[in-house]
Structure formats: C-alpha cells, structure tokens
C-alpha cells in the first residue's frame, strides 16, 4: 500500500525497476504513469524498456518494451488515451503506446530530431518543434495527426533552437522559449499560431536559458526558471 502523505511534504515511494536518465514520464488516463526509454546514465546506450508507476500502491511494474530504444525523445498523451513517443537518439522513428492493451506499436516517422518539444494542440494534432540532429540545432517543425497517422510540415521557427521549452497558452498558441542555438544559449522567444500554422517572434527573456523549465500559471502567464547560459 502507498504511504499516506501529509500536505506540503515529500515521502519516499517505490524504486524504479531500471535506472534511467533522458527518459519520459507520462500521466495516463487511469492515473498511472508511463516511464519510457532513456539511458542507464548520461553516456550509456538508449534502452527500449518501459515501466508503469501506480500511485495507489507506490510500485513500479514492467510493461511491454518500446519498438525502438531511444533517449532524448518526447512522449505526448493523445485525446484517445494513447501516447505518441517520437524522435530522440533513434532518429525520428515514432511509436504509439496503448494503455488499453499495454503495448507499443510503430507509427509514421518524421524528420530526425532529439531534444525537441512536442505539444498537443486543441485540434488534436501534436506540434513537434525544433530540437537537433547530426546537422546541429533545427528551425523546422512538424505536425502529427493521430487520426491519419501522418506528419505534415509546420512553419519554420525564426531561429534554430534545441533544449528549449514549449508552453500551450490559454488562447491556443504555443510559446517557444530559450534553448541552445548553434551559437549557444538563447534569450529569444516565439509564438506558434495553429490557425495560420506559423511562428512569429515575441518578446525576449531577460536571461539566456537552456535546459530550463517553463510553467503555465493560473493567470495565463508563464514562469521560466533555472538553467541558463551554457550548453549541456
């Protein structure tokens, strides 16, 4: 049984089955959390293993393996309960996790990238933006349509970036902020508008940041915190 927790405190829970960094953790419709991929350490080879955390028991249990070992990827919950897992060290293969059957299956592939962001839009599509591949930081973006299992081009970002953040705003637009350009950490930001499928520059941050966090507040503002000024 999970331990009772007092408000405003942290308590220990069960240990993961596999040590991993550069993985994803995704809340599923039933309340469990899917942990997928990553590496045993920052320099290790990617793994295909996945596990489920049950908050009612505090325990981790193994689930089916992904179709491809990957780290630095994204995992996006879809409206139908499945999870789109895309990109990372695998290039840009993609797959879908179905919590109903507890299985992974292949999905259509897009442009190779890792350290990107993936944002579920109000129209049910997923915006995958920027990131990096063997050519360096990217300015390109794509849209995944789960209804047709297909990718289409989104407008290009004003500048290439990787290890940035993407925040879905109350008006349906997506705020892309910071990250590393090919010249180092950036303080620029831009907005993606789904209605026009375009990115436009917006106000710059006060500090150059990468590998940071961005959190949408209840008043619609976004707070950007922590890491700045240097590449991983």
Image: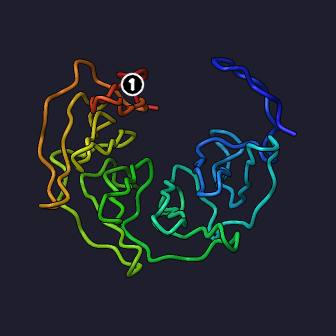
Whether residue 221 is visible here, answered yes or no, is: yes
Residue at 29 percent of width and 33 percent of height: 178
Single out the residue that lies furthest toward the bottom: 148
What colouring style does the render use? rainbow
Which quarter of the rendering shows the N terminus?
top right
Between 25 and 92, the one nearer to me in the picture: 25
The reply, left or right, for residue 57 in relation to residue 121 is right
Image coordinates of residue 76 in percent, x first then y, are 48, 57
SS category of the residue bearing label 1: loop
Mark 1: few, some, or many residues within 10 Å (few <14, many ≥20)? some
Residue at label 1? 230
Residue at 24 percent of width and 27 percent of height: 187
Between 14 and 208, the one nearer to me in the picture: 14
Whether residue 35 is visible here, answered yes or no, is: no
Image coordinates of residue 20 in percent, x first then y, are 69, 43
Residue at 50 percent of width and 76 percent of height: 107
Q: Quadrant of residue 59?
A: top right
Image coordinates of residue 183 in percent, x first then y, are 26, 34
Residue at 28 percent of width and 36 percent of height: 177
Single out the residue that lies furthest toward the right: 1
Residue 155 in the image: above or below residue 166: below
Image coordinates of residue 53 in percent, x first then y, are 73, 48
The reply, left or right, for residue 86 in relation to residue 144 is right
Residue 220 in the image: above or below residue 126: above
């Amino acid at each position: 049984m999970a331990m009772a927790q007092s408000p405003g405190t942290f308590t220990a829970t069960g240990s993961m089955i596999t040590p991993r960094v550069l993985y994803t953790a995704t809340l599923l419709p039933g309340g469990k959390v899917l942990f997928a991929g990553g590496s045993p350490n920052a320099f290790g080879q990617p793994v295909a293993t996945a596990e489920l955390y049950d908050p009612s028991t505090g325990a981790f249990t193994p689930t089916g393996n992904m179709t491809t070992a990957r780290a630095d990827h994204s995992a996006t919950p879809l409206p139908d309960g499945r999870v789109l897992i895309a990109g990372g060290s695998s290039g840009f293969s993609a797959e879908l996790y179905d919590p109903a059957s507890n299985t992974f299956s292949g999905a259509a592939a897009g442009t190779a990238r890792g350290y990107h962001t993936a944002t579920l839009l109000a129209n049910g599509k997923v915006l995958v933006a920027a990131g990096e591949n063997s050519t360096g930081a990217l300015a390109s973006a794509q849209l995944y349509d789960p209804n047709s299992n297909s990718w289409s081009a989104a407008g290009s970002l004003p500048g290439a970036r990787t290890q940035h953040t993407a925040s879905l705003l109350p008006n349906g637009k997506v705020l892309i902020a910071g990250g590393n350009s090919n010249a180092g950490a950036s303080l620029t930001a831009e907005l993606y508008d789904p209605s026009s499928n375009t990115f436009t520059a917006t106000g710059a941050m006060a500090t150059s940041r990468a590998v940071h966090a961005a959190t949408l507040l209840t008043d619609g503002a976004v707070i950007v915190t922590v890491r700045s000024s240097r590449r991983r």
